[in-house]
């Protein structure tokens, strides 16, 4: 198997953590620079990660997780876990939008509906996820926990969120720092 992605992507990191005990090749791309052409050649959606397993190509982290669960015999997710992933992905997607907008020179602090909606979505989902953490819903290291861990560590890495009032998310992240591949996949490296 070959995983194509970037070391700074939380979506790629979640996949790498899921593959912690599985041999695979990792192709690290600078998707906003010299790796853009390779991304175009490999994924028509222009997204990372992408998994290549023989003749099978899989284009999205969530779909990759389903593919790997079936291939590796991992437990399937419950509907509650699927909803947790929807919340994690919603916050993650909105944060990526803010980061890319900021890097494009746009004022993401302006009082504009588009940015207001992103900020509202981020904080509403993070508060809900913090309540779920407090309720013990992420007390095991499984794919939803891996995704939440990757999101929270990426938000901290990019300084995208003020964790005041949702400190339990950082505590959750810190609790899992000793899991396999966490250090090796740290985007700060």
Image (cartoon, rainbow, N blue to C red):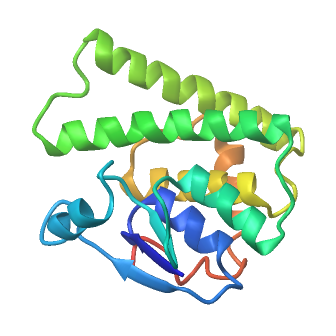
Q: Residue at x 22, y 18 (%)?
A: 110
x, y percent for residue 126: 61, 34
x, y percent for residue 119: 42, 24
* Location of residue 149 with respect to 3 vertically, above or below: above
Answer whether residue 44 is visible to the viewer in this image.
yes
Q: Is residue 2 left or right of residue 14?
A: left
* Location of residue 158 with respect to 189 vertically, above or below: above
Could you tell me which quadrant the C terminus lies in?
bottom left
Q: Is residue 5 left or right of residue 89?
A: left
Q: Quadrant of residue 43?
A: bottom left
Q: Quadrant of residue 109?
A: top left
Task: Decide which of 63, 29 is in the foreground and name it.
Answer: 63
x, y percent for residue 90: 53, 33
Q: Residue at x 30, y 52 (%)?
A: 44
Q: Residue at x 55, y 40 (%)?
A: 89
* Location of residue 124 with respect to 80 vertically, above or below: above
Answer whether residue 173 is visible to the viewer in this image.
no
Q: Is residue 122 left or right of residue 159?
A: right
Could you tell me which quadrant the N terminus lies in?
bottom right
Q: Quadrant of residue 7?
A: bottom left
Q: Is residue 174 left or right of residue 74?
A: left
Outermost front residue: 55
Task: Decide which of 177, 52 is in the foreground and name it.
Answer: 52
User: Across the whole image, how many numbered discs are drawn on residues?
Assistant: 0
x, y percent for residue 54: 52, 79
């Amino acid at each position: 198997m070959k995983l194509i992605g970037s070391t700074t992507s939380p979506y790629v990191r979640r996949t790498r953590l899921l593959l912690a005990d599985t041999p695979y090749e990792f192709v690290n791309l600078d998707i906003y620079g010299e790796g853009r052409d390779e991304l175009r050649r490999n994924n028509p959606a222009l997204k990372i990660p992408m998994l290549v397993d023989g003749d099978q190509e899989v284009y999205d982290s969530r779909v990759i997780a389903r593919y790997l669960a079936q291939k590796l015999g991992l437990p399937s997710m419950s509907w509650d876990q699927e909803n947790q992933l929807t919340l994690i992905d919603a916050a993650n997607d909105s944060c990526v939008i803010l980061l890319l907008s900021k890097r494009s020179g746009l004022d993401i602090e302006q009082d504009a509906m588009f940015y207001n909606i992103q900020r509202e979505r981020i904080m509403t989902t993070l508060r809900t996820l913090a309540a779920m953490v407090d309720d013990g819903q992420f007390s095991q290291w499984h794919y939803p926990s891996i995704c939440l861990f990757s999101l929270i560590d990426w938000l901290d890495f990019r300084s995208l969120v003020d964790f005041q009032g949702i400190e339990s998310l950082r505590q959750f992240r810190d609790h899992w720092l000793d899991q396999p591949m966490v250090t090796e996949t740290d985007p700060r490296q």
